[in-house]
Image (cartoon, rainbow, N blue to C red):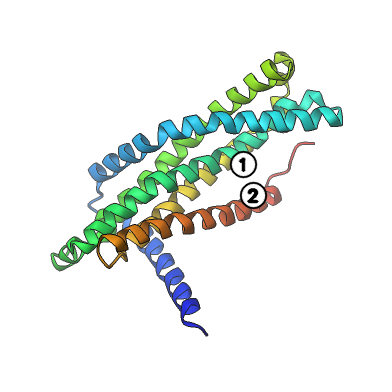
Amino acid sequence: MSSPLMGALRGSGEMFALAGDALRSTFRRPFQWKEMVQQSWFVASVTILPTALVSIPFGAVIALQVGGLVRQLGAQSFIGSTAVLAVVREASPIVTALLIAGAGGSAVCADLGSRKIREEIDAMEVLGINPVQRLIVPRVLAMMLVGLLLNGLVSVVGVIGGYFFNVVLQGGTPGAYLASFTALAQLPDLWAGEVKAVVFGAIAAVVSSYKGLHAGGGPKGVGDAVNQSVVITFMLLFFANFILTAVYFQAVPQKG
């Protein structure tokens, strides 16, 4: 077995171990409430505006594409429901996760990597302070919370953007667009999007924390760790999205 493959398998195992340690440490006292609030505010401050701006063209593109396709099929009355399904169930959690991983996750990785090369992590361990409980758990919970809230924002902005572009640019009927919301969409679709956002936030936090804790080689090593954390997070997000979507379709009956 080649050395790169062994390194990848070892890194995957250590990442899962870190996730397990973070889960166990979540219920230990004392809980770092102040750190969690600070990290939540930081992640929200660097992601909320880009997320809102990205969600507008996402909703517009989905509305334009879906509107044209549905008109070709002669099902204009389902434009609203199909656009809502695409935004709420798929586009919204993906947009939220990508921006959280790209903005918040890279910042977390850089912060922990800087602490690592300055030997602050080693100093905490010498003093008997658990770095996972003190640093990782608040960041994981903060990114999960921000992901949950941002997903709601993206859903609202995306649906409004889709309504504007469908009604104004494509000449759709406002009443038909709004009335068709419940034709195919249902409340579990919203819960599925929220669950995805929480899971994606946890994945981004664990990957960025792991790469930050294992950064080495000075500032260049921290930069490499940030790049690797973003790439790995994106790959895991799309894989997790496929798994969660497949499970959802098997567990929840769809309207038809």
Q: Is mark 1 on a helix, strand or loop?
A: helix
Residue depicted at 34% across the width and 34% down the height: 45
Q: Badge 2, how many Cα within 10 Å: few under 14, some, many 20+?
A: some
* Residue pointed to by mark 1: 90
Q: Badge 1, how many Cα within 10 Å: few under 14, some, many 20+?
A: some
Measured as percent of width and height from the top left, residue 157 is found at 54, 26
Badge nearest the viewer, 2 or 1: 1
**On screen, residue 134 above or below 35:** below
> Which is nearer the N-term, disc 2 or disc 1?
1
**On screen, residue 98 above or below 168:** below
Residue type beneath disc 2: Thr
Measured as percent of width and height from the top left, residue 51 is found at 47, 34
- The quadrant of the picture occupied by the C terminus is top right
Asked whether, in this view, residue 145 is left or right of residue 67, the answer is left
The residue lying toward the viewer, choosing from 178 and 133, is 178
Tag on residue 245?
Answer: 2
> In terms of image quadrants, where is residue 94?
top right
Residue type beneath disc 1: Glu
Circles 2 and 1: CB distance less than 8 Å?
Answer: yes
Could you tell me if residue 242 is visible in this image? yes
The residue lying toward the viewer, choosing from 56 and 180, is 56
Report, in whole angstroms, how far the alpha carbon at label 2 lies from the one at label 1.
9 Å
Measured as percent of width and height from the top left, residue 165 is found at 65, 22
Q: What element carries label 2?
A: helix
Residue depicted at 62% across the width and 28% down the height: 60
Residue depicted at 63% across the width and 25% down the height: 162
